[in-house]
Structure formats: structure tokens, C-alpha cells
Image: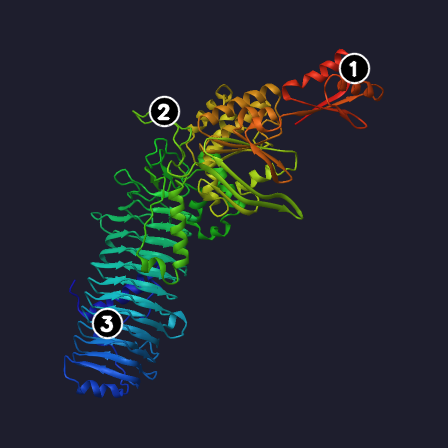
């Protein structure tokens, strides 16, 4: 729109008074229109005389030295440093002012501008077309480089550091005003207020780094522009785009922008936007959207971006529509999606052409192994919905209050809010986007960015949380199979290296090494206190430990949440609600694990409880309760089951039934690690038996190689004890004794033999115990 400059200034002032949110507090001192720039009558530097004497179009090589005062370049030429050249403004007005076209300024140090925001004192002011400002260092300047009606100017390779002032009193590091087709490239800017591009079309912002500032970049009325390869980190806002059309953001890193707004990327009334292959990390809000696109005939595309570790990955006003998200990774954000205000987020698509996004909190399945979840992902949390309406509730994140609210919503569907968004084709693995070397390895964001890339690589290598083992595809034409969780990884599902655990001065586990292959069952066997349960709880992340535990390629300590998705656990002491029925119990835990409620009926049938779904837990037998606990562990179809003395409280019949159920699961491809005291359980179920004593491995081998003898403790009356001892010894047994009992070691299959012998000889027992 061909506005006159006076109208521009008036309209800009109105915008700054009326614009909501982030834009409102940003530009109380908006730059004046070009013809109203106030020019300080600073003393000219001696260099200005050399410039006046140089022919137009020549290259002026400036000898090393310090030149104090205003350097005015009013003719086309190249001013190039020949050695260490400092241009010092002396603390008054601009340092360099360029009023002629086709000027180059290269290799100088520019310091000491004035400090007047009213007069907009700058290190370099360019007021003519086609300048090149490159490879300079600007320090102690109020505004760094200002373009005013300077189209096709290049600002490249400069280092800009503002004056040591409070944030509100600083000037902009780079300001592009009414200067179309400018290129801002490879500059390093810190300690300024903003990098501003206003009323300038076709601007390219490439490979710059902006840190410790207010706005890494702010675009307004600057369409047909590109932001690519920039690193905007540690600012109040990374990038904020307003009232602009046809802008593309690619390969940028927007990290740790956590000021009052704290947006990695903010959008207001932007049309024709493409956001792809960016890393948006550790911001308060990853992307904030207000009225973008503003036109109903335009669609915005967000593709292959990584949104990780943000407080909120995506925040939008309820009226926002026509945005499409595909092949993005939403990784470990506190809140994936927030709606800022009452209402629903409508007409935005999170599945495009059958492809959705990766969500680290997705708890669904991939039965046919095509990399797409079989159930939709829904951003559904009562606490998050309340928090979106009342931000002060963020004080209670991770508190029992949050857990109680979400538990109540899952237990009582009437309390559940409507899903904020639905992704019908969630991806089972993250989409790894590798940036160019300059962006990925340099500067302030490198540490966190490198860690994110490493974590994404691990998740992809480990298959994220693809749940397939033991599941059958329901899709038409598919055949039954038992796919591996991650067929491209090694056969070892569990790797334990140097595991040690101490309680006070007592070492319970000492430098344990253990490898468990997929589809096998391993028994941890030993006396009470041998460390069996402690090992399982370390795998679950319930104990701190030394050493390393990897499950499915993930570090159990660093990637605890992702690791626990691969586990199903049945403890020795059950924690079920007696007042709930079996069906209600599975429905409750299905909601907690975020799996479809229909999965509950499947696992109840799998463990043989289909006929008892209406019984309350308190009415079930001990064996049924144990099978119900196993059904809960199987809900999310984990590839690994951890069982702690699973039959310790069952009678002989229930123990046999439960053991047969576990044998069937192992044959179906489950990996099982279980603790036991019973030799017959190890022989029936385990491929390997790890014999533990005082936290150390004494033996490791197949059950047949383990000493399978058990010891009988036989209590008789004192007067018959000696005669019974002699009878057992004469009959080929090897009895021992103490002051209260006889002890006989026998094979498990011959436990009755010594008792039968004694009974047939007329001895009466006071008590009999069996010990493995």
C-alpha cells in the first residue's frame, strides 16, 4: 500500500497503542519516519577529509589508528581498514553516516555512539541504496546498524554489542526501515534491544545469532521475506512476525527465550507462512499464534519442526484457524498444546495426507508396524484446560493437585474436557531434522541443541515407544504376527552394566552386569536380601543407583519416561481398589496409561478373566487378583514384563495356572524378568537363572545347570528326633540337625520321600517347611 511517510508514522503509533500481547510493550519508542530523523551536528573525524578527497568509486584503505568524531561517507566508495582501525564517535551522535549509494564499509571497529534514544544515535546509519556493511565490530553503541530508505543493502559478518544499559533503554542492534531487498547475514548480536525489520519487503535474514536481547527479530509489514539458519537464543522473544505476508522460516534455532512473553516464535496477522525444519527448544511458549492466517483462503504449513522442552509447545487463541501441522516432533514439553481463552481450536489440521506428528506422551500402538499409531492422539488434560484459562495454576504443575485433578477426570468421564486437538495419524518415531554445521555446533545454544539431536537419534534408533509385541493387526487383509518392538536394534532388550545400590552403609547390589535377550525369560533367584527386588526397582526408576541400565536402547535414568513405556510391572504386594470391578479397574488404568478403553476387555480375556469382569476386586480370589494385576501390566502391550515374586501369595493350583499364563506370554514374544524362591518356577518358565547372593551373581546359566535341591525342615518331638535322624541316615538321605529340627536336602520331585519314610515308621511331625 503506497502510504505517505506521515501516514505511516501515525498508523504505527496507533498500532503500538492498540496491539495486544507481545507487540504492545515492544515499541513505545517507535522509529520515526526517515525524513524526521534528527541529525546531531557532531564534530567530523579526520577521516572525513580523506573521504572528501577520494575519487568517487575508489577504494580508500584506512591506515591503522583511532579516528574520533563523525565519519561521513557522502560519495560512492569502499572504505576498508588497513590494520586495526577504530572509528570512535566520542559519545556524541552517530559514529558513521552513509548518505551516498554503493558504499562499502569493511573491517573497522566502531565505538562510542551517543546515548540519546530521542535522536536515535547509531554506530552506522545508512540512508542510501546498495551499501555493504561487512566484517565490522560495533561496541558501546546505542543502535548498531540502521538502514533508512536503503534498499538492496547487505549487512554481513558484523559483531554488534550494545551499550551496558537496562533493557528498556537499549537501542536496536539492527534496524531495517523502508529498505526492501536487504540481506542480513552471519552477524553476531548480543546485549541490544531488538533486531527490527519494518516496512521492508523481500528481506533475507540468514545465519545470524542474536542473544541476551529483547526480540531476536521483529518483522512488521515485511512480506516476501526469509528467515533461515538463525540462532535466536536467551532473549525475551525469539522472533515475532506481524502484519506480513509470504514469510518463510527454515532451519532456525529458537531456544531459551523466556522473558515476560517468552515466545520462541510469535505470529500476529501473518498470511502465507511456511515454518519448516526449525528447532524450537526450552522456551516458555514454543509458538504463539494470534489471527494467523488472517484470511480464510490461506493455509499455513508447519512441517518437520522440533518442539522440545518448552513449557508450552504451541499456544493459540481460540479463533485461530487454517494451520496445518505435519511431521513435527513434540518432545517432552510440559504442555503440548494450550488454548489461550475460552473456546475450541477449530479448523486446524494435525494430520495431512495420512501423516501426523510425533508426540512424546502418546500411549497408543502400532500393530502393523507402519510407523503410524493405530489410535488417535488427543491433547486431553483437565488440569491443562484449567491452567489455560487461569495461568496462575501453573504454580501447581507436577504437584499432587495436578495429579488429583487429572485422575478425577479420567476416572469420571463427565469431568473430562473436550480434546484441545486430535492427531488421527500420530507418528511412532520422532522426525530427526539435522541443521547445517554452523547452526548446530556454534554459540550459546549448542549444548542443548546437541543434546536434543542426540536424544532424537536415540529415540529413532530405539523405535521410540512402538508397542507391537504380542499384538495382532486388525486392519483388513493383515495377518497375525508378533513383530519385534524395534526390529533394527540389537537382540538385547535389557543391558545392565556395573549396577550398584547402597542403602546407608549396606551394599545391596554390587557391580551387577546383566544382558537379557528379546523374547527370553530370566529368573533372579536368591534368598531374601539377595538384591532381587532392588534390581527390578532400579530398572523401574524407583531407586537411585550407580552404573547404567538401558532398556530398548534408552537410558533408564535419563530417559525414564520413555523407558517406562516399555515396561509392565507386577509387584509382590498388589495395589488394586477393592470397590472397583475388574472392568472398572482396567478402564481406570487404561485412562491413566492413555490407551483405548477397549484394550481392557482384550487383556481381561487374555488372562482368563472375561467371565469375571463384573466382580469387584475384593470378591476375587488371590489367583484372580494376580491375573488382574498382570492384565493391568499388559494394557499398553509393553515388550518387557518385570514380575516380583508373582506367585508368592498363591496356592498350588493358582500358582500352576498363573505360571502357564506366563509361559504363554513368553512364547508370544514377551521378554520376562522375574524374581522367585521356587525352583520349579525357574525350571518351568526361565531360559536363564541368575543366582544372587548379597547382591552379587554367584551363578548364571540354564535352569538345568542350577542346583535344584530343596531343603526340608522337619520338626519332631525331642524324644523322637534322634531315632528319626538315624533312620534317615540309614536310608540314604544326608540329614543334619539343630536343637529344634532335622534338615534333609532332596530334589524337588522327591520332597515327599523322607516324610513318607518317617510316617510309615510311626513318627509324628509337629511341623514341616520347604526351603529352596
Dot 2 alpha-carbon crowd within 10 angstroms: few under 14, some 14 to 19, many 20 or more? few
Which of the two residues, 552 or 167, is positioned nearer the viewer here?
A: 552
State the residue lying farthest toward the left: 56
Relative to 385, is 207 on the left or the right?
left
Q: Is residue 9 visible?
A: no
Which of the two residues, 415 or 99, is positioned nearer the viewer here?
A: 99
Which residue: 43% across, 46% down?
384
Q: Earlier in the sequence, mark 1 or mark 2?
A: 2
> Residue at label 2?
480
Residue 655, percent across and down? Answer: 58, 22
- Which dot, 1 or 2, sits closer to the camera? 1
In the image, residue 248 sits, relative to residue 158, either above or below, namely above
Residue 500, percent across and down? Answer: 58, 45
Dot 3 alpha-carbon crowd within 10 angstroms: few under 14, some 14 to 19, many 20 or more? many
Residue 219, percent across and down? Answer: 27, 62
> Residue at label 3?
147
Amino acid at each position: 500500500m503506497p502510504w505517505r511517510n506521515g501516514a505511516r508514522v501515525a498508523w504505527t503509533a496507533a498500532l503500538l497503542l492498540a496491539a495486544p500481547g507481545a507487540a504492545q510493550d515492544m515499541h513505545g519508542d517507535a522509529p520515526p519516519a526517515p525524513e524526521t530523523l534528527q541529525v546531531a551536528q557532531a564534530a567530523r573525524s579526520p577521516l572525513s577529509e580523506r573521504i572528501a578527497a577520494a575519487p568517487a568509486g575508489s577504494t580508500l584503505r584506512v591506515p591503522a589508528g583511532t579516528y574520533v568524531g563523525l565519519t561521513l561517507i557522502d560519495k560512492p566508495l569502499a572504505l576498508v581498514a588497513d590494520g586495526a582501525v577504530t572509528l570512535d564517535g566520542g559519545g556524541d551522535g552517530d559514529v558513521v553516516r552513509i548518505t551516498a549509494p554503493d558504499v562499502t564499509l569493511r573491517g573497522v571497529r566502531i565505538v562510542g555512539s551517543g546515548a540519546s534514544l530521542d535522536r536515535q544515535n547509531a554506530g552506522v546509519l545508512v540512508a542510501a541504496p546498495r551499501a555493504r556493511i561487512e566484517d565490522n565490530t560495533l561496541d558501546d553503541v546505542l543502535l548498531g546498524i540502521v538502514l533508512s530508505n536503503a534498499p538492496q543493502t547487505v549487512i554481513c559478518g558484523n559483531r554488534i554489542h550494545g551499550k551496558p544499559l537496562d533493557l528498556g533503554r537499549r537501542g536496536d542492534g539492527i534496524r531495517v526501515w523502508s529498505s526492501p531487498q536487504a540481506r542480513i547475514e552471519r552477524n553476531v548480536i548480543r546485549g541490544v534491544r531488538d533486531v527490527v525489520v519494518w516496512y521492508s519487503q523481500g528481506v533475507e535474514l540468514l545465519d545470524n545469532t542474536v542473544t541476551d536481547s529483547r526480540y531476536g527479530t521483529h518483522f512488521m509489514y515485511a512480506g516476501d521475506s526469509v528467515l533461515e539458519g538463525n540462532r535466536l537464543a536467551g532473549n525475551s522473544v525469539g522472533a515475532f512476525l506481524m502484519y506480513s505476508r509470504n514469510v518463510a522460516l527454515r532451519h532456525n534455532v529458537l531456544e531459551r527465550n523466556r522473558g515476560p512473553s517468552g515466545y520462541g516464535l510469535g505470529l500476529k496477522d501473518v498470511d502465507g507462512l511456511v515454518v519448516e525444519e526449525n528447532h524450537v527448544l526450552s522456551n516458555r511458549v514454543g509458538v504463539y499464534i494470534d489471527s494467523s492466517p488472517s484470511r480464510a483462503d490461506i493455509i499455513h504449513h508447519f512441517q518437520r519442526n522440533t518442539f522440545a522442552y518448552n513449557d508450552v509447545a504451541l499456544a493459540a487463541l481460540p479463533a485461530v484457524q487454517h494451520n496445518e501441522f505435519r511431521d513435527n516432533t513434540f518432545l517432552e514439553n510440559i504442555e503440548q498444546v494450550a488454548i489461550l481463552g475460552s473456546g475450541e481450536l477449530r479448523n486446524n489440521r494435525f494430520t495431512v495426507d495420512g501423516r501426523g506428528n510425533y508426540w512424546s506422551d502418546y500411549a497408543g500402538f502400532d500393530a502393523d508396524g507402519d510407523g503410524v499409531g493405530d489410535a488417535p492422539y488427543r491433547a486431553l488434560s483437565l488440569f491443562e484446560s484449567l491452567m489455560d484459562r487461569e495461568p496462575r495454576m501453573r504454580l501447581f504443575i507436577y504437584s499432587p493437585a495436578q495429579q488429583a485433578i487429572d485422575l478425577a477426570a479420567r476416572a469420571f468421564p463427565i469431568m473430562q474436557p473436550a480434546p484441545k486437538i486430535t492427531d488421527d495419524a500420530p507418528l511412532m518415531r520422532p522426525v530427526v531434522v539435522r541443521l547445517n554445521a554452523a547452526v548446530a555446533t556454534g554459540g550459546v545454544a549448542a549444548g542443548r541443541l546437541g543434546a536434543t539431536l542426540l536424544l532424537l537419534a536415540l529415540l529413532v534408533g530405539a523405535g521410540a515407544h512402538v508397542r507391537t509385541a504380542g499384538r495382532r493387526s486388525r486392519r483388513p487383509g493383515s495377518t497375525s504376527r508378533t513383530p519385534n518392538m524395534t526390529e533394527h536394534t540389537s537382540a538385547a532388550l535389557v543391558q545392565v552394566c556395573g549396577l550398584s545400590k547402597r542403602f546407608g552403609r549396606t551394599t545391596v547390589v554390587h557391580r551387577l552386569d546383566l544382558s537379557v535377550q528379546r523374547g527370553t525369560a530370566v529368573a533372579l533367584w536368591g534368598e531374601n536380601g539377595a538384591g532381587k527386588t532392588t534390581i527390578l526397582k532400579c530398572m523401574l526408576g524407583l531407586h537411585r543407583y550407580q552404573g547404567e541400565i538401558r532398556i530398548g536402547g534408552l537410558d533408564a535414568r535419563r530417559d525414564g519416561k520413555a523407558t517406562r513405556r516399555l515396561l509392565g510391572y507386577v509387584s509382590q504386594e498388589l495395589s488394586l481398589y477393592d470397590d472397583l470391578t475388574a472392568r472398572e479397574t482396567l478402564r481406570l488404568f487404561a485412562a491413566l496409561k492413555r490407551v483405548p478403553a477397549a484394550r481392557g476387555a482384550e487383556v481381561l480375556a487374555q488372562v482368563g478373566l472375561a467371565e469375571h469382569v463384573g466382580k469387584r476386586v475384593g470378591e476375587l480370589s488371590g489367583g484372580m487378583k494376580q491375573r488382574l494385576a498382570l492384565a493391568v501390566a499388559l494394557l499398553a502391550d509393553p515388550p518387557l514384563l518385570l514380575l516380583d515374586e508373582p506367585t508368592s501369595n498363591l496356592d498350588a493350583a493358582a500358582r500352576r495356572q498363573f505360571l502357564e499364563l506366563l509361559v504363554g506370554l513368553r512364547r508370544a514374544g514377551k521378554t520376562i524378568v522375574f524374581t522367585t524362591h521356587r525352583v520349579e518356577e525357574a525350571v518351568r518358565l526361565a531360559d536363564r537363572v541368575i543366582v544372587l547372593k548379597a547382591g552379587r551373581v554367584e551363578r548364571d546359566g540354564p535352569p538345568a545347570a542350577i542346583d535344584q535341591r530343596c531343603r526340608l525342615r522337619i520338626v519332631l518331638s525331642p524324644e523322637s528326633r534322634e531315632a528319626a535322624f538315624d533312620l534317615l541316615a540309614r536310608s540314604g538321605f544326608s540329614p543334619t540337625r539343630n536343637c529344634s529340627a532335622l534338615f534333609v536336602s532332596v530334589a524337588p520331585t522327591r520332597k515327599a520321600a523322607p516324610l513318607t519314610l518317617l510316617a510309615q515308621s510311626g513318627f509324628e511331625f509337629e511341623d514341616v517347611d520347604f526351603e529352596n
